[in-house]
Image (cartoon, coloured by chain):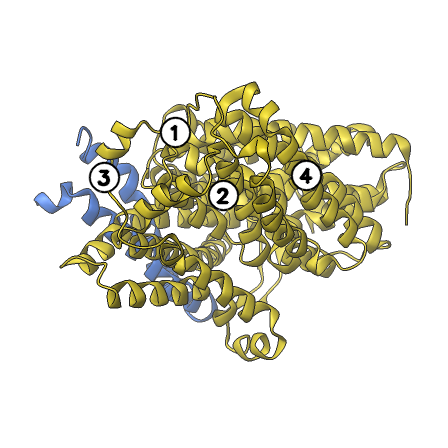
Amino acid sequence: MPEQLPVTLGFWLLALVPLAALLVLLVWLRWTAAQAGAVGFFIGSIIAWLAFQSGFEVISVATAKGIWDAIFILYVVWPALLLYEVTEKAGAFDVFRVGIERYTKSRLLLVLAFGWVFASFLQGIAGFGTPIAIVAPLLVGIGVNPVMAVVIPLIGHAWANMFGTLAVGWLATIRVVDLANPTFTAFSAALLLWIPNLLAGLTIAWLYGRWQAVVRALPAVAVVSLVHGGGQLFLSTVNPIISNFIPATLALGVIFAIERLPRYREAEPIESPIFQERGEMAADGGEQEEPKMSIHLAFLPYYALVAVSLIGLLVPPINQFLGRLEIGFPFPQVTTGFGAVTPADPEYGEFAVFTHPGTFLLVATIIGYMVFRFRGFYEKGAERNMLSGMTQNAIPASIAILGFLTLSQIMNHAGMITVLALGIAAVSPAIVYAFLSNFIGVLGAFMTSSNTASNILFAPLQQQTALATPGLDASRIIGAQSAGGAIGNAIAPANVVLGTGTAGIVGQEGEVLKYTLPWSAIAAGLVGLASVILFLLGVQLF
Amino acid sequence: MEWLRNKSTLQWISFLLVLLSFPLINYGVRESTAVAVIGFAMVVIGFLIPPVARYLTEGE
């Protein structure tokens, strides 16, 4: 009964406190994500208890659900870190660095290929943070400084969240809202998602070498964005399930073709602040000696990851067989003093273990390890170093993810997230709401680190608001919500922690957010403007 | 008590306390409040460790 929730300025500000505290602790005070996440849990619990009348049962159910949500993500984090260690200890990252520099002289194109095109491809097939966990160490491997190695895939993969992972976000959305015009809703979402896609390509080029690099990268960015954004827009009206996967895969081929153009054959005469100097790389453990293995062998675990994911997800009999084992836990209904009800769930957070990206990562890791071990690429005691390297990064990352997701569930169960969204809706005229609706999506993704969860949380509310507000169209508003949910993944703490963990810079989450926060604000602002234009035009295409 | 100043040990304890509380809370909220209280206490202690450790290991 959300209508009993106190949607007043005082309660709205109280609901905002845990989020503001997280940002202050992470960005301003530079606490680590584990410390900030843990403190966020306490702040959220106390406000939920004292102000939002959430008793022990509500908070404990929310906490347990948050832990289960975190386990789902940690099953990506741990195998991803192990994959990194298995690859790194075999010396494969030195091979990436040397081999790729031989393959293409354009480091600008290389950064775009890894941070945007490959990250989007991984989001298309795997998702759940896999693009960050895989691409961040690859970028470090080719010499990008670790903070930028996390920032770039965070920005580069965001647009692909809604229709990525075979459109899991879209499927969840149509399950929670009864859409009058699903085709136009998917089209609106895809149209708005083209904005963060194009902006990602341009931003990565800008980070590489400011405006000089943007001008140089412009043809490549335009072509890739046409394939990504245009392809997704077209396919969203045909079959949303494959609307991200197909263009993201095509773009992989396109970027290889672009590399053959004379413009990108030679190294660009641009000084890039994102690359570490040779001396720094050597100090970080980088070697410049002749690689011991071929570049394709070095990439073997990643080839295995792509192959295993494609077979596991796209071959129906295998997918059905692997999808048989599903795990979920029962939770009772809980109600706050304000009447915010969270219904009982017989199998909360049910997921198929063998089609989870974590399983694909684990299989790829085992294949990589066995081949590297068989070929003699490991030194004595390498296994112990791998495990210690993995836990060193995985433990603080795991505490942070547990903190963020328990906080998210507590805020959700206490009705705090609903108060935040209803507060925005209550004071916004139709045109302002059209602008702000995607920011609600951003908020949902920031809280839950998931486009899907953001849409599950807010799509019903957005639809109700649109239907109750003259002039607003529910399809466009849910499209904006979906675009916001995708953009929010660039600042989602669990994603940031995943990146800092795999790039070996645990504790520097604030440094990463200093770049991804402004980017997300700009992207959401542009999506908001586009939503206003769509609102003013009032065109109904389907 | 030197282990109390070991950041890595504290992080392990924090992580395991929060993670292992899940079955207790999940069972407790359905069957026994006392079990849920124990589970929730584990979460509270687990999440207290990172900010407390920040001061215990300051300067390291």
Viewed as shown, does residue A451 lie left or right of A64? right
Q: Earlier in the sequence, mark 1 or mark 4?
A: 4
Q: Which mark is residue A285?
A: 3
**Same chain letter for marks 3 and 4:** yes
Q: Residues within 10 Å of mark 2 (few under 14, many from 20)?
A: many
Q: Nearer the viewer, mark 3 or mark 4?
A: 4
Q: Earlier in the sequence, mark 3 or mark 1?
A: 1
Quadrant in the rendering for residue A71 = bottom left
Q: Earlier in the sequence, mark 3 or mark 2?
A: 2
Quadrant in the rendering for residue A296 = bottom left
Q: Which chain is yellow?
A: A
Estimate the spatial distance between the alpha carbons at disc 3 and disc 4, rounded to whole Å.
37 Å
Disc 3: host chain: A
Estimate the spatial distance between the alpha carbons at disc 4 and disc 2, rounded to whole Å.
16 Å
Along the viewing direction, whichever of A21 and A256 lies nearer the viewer: A256
**Same chain letter for marks 1 and 4:** yes
Assign a secondary structure to mark 1.
loop
Along the viewing direction, whichever of A377 and A329 lies nearer the viewer: A377
